[in-house]
Image (spheres, grey):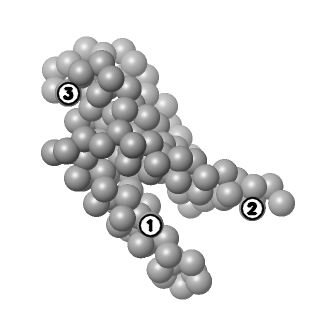
Amino acid sequence: MLHHRNDPTEAYRRIDFDARVRGADSRQLVDLCLEQVIGSVGRALHAQERSDNSAKSAALTRAISALTALQMGVDMANPTAGALVQIYQAARGAILDCVTRFDPVKLAAIRQDFIDIREAMLRSIAA
């Protein structure tokens, strides 16, 4: 815990995150959560390579929090709601499994899935 208080990178990340949340509309919040899942899973993979269990745990926790926020924010009137909930639940379960039995291949696949989802969302907005 104290490590994060003295980590300037974590402090800047938190400030940036808080500022982006305050000024965001619903689409921007979804994008931010997707970005958090992607980045957090990537940080967990990198931490595992460095044998940094504390950073890995923090990153996995952040990914789970972002997935929980995504799942809670699903508009159930949306025709894709069921599929989104299913994707978020499956990813959340897989990441929770990686807390006790780290599987870099599974995490890399989850990360790529969320990169693809985010890119598709951004393309649909631009169109």
Q: Residue at horizontal 43%, vertical 22%?
A: 12
* Residue furthest front as drawn: 105
**Circle 1 Cα neighbour tier, 10 Å, few/some/many (<14 / 14–19 / ≥20):** some
Above or below 72: residue 105: above
Mark 2 element type:
helix
Residue behind mark 3: 53
| Percent coordinates x, y for residue 91 in the rendering | 37, 58
Left or right placement of residue 8 versus residue 4 in this view: right
Is residue 49 at all visible to an observer of this figure?
A: yes
Q: Residue at horizontal 38%, vertical 48%?
A: 106
Residue behind mark 2: 124
Mark 1 element type:
helix
Gap between marks 1 and 2, in whole Å?
19 Å
Report the quarter where the C terminus lies.
Answer: bottom right
Gap between marks 2 and 3, in whole Å?
38 Å
Residue behind mark 1: 87
| Percent coordinates x, y for residue 66 in the rendering | 39, 51
Residues at discs 2 and 3 in contact (Cβ within 8 Å): no
**Circle 3 Cα neighbour tier, 10 Å, few/some/many (<14 / 14–19 / ≥20):** some
Above or below 83: residue 10: above
Left or right placement of residue 122 versus residue 12 in this view: right
Gap between marks 1 and 3, in whole Å?
27 Å
Q: Identify the amino acid type marked 2.
A: Ser
Above or below 114: residue 60: above
Q: Identify the amino acid type marked 3.
A: Asn
Q: Residue at horizontal 27%, vertical 32%?
A: 56
Given residues 14 and 94, the one toward you in this image is 94
Above or below 40: residue 82: below
The numbered mark, 1 or 3, whose residue comes first in the sequence reads 3
Report the quarter where the N terminus lies.
Answer: top left
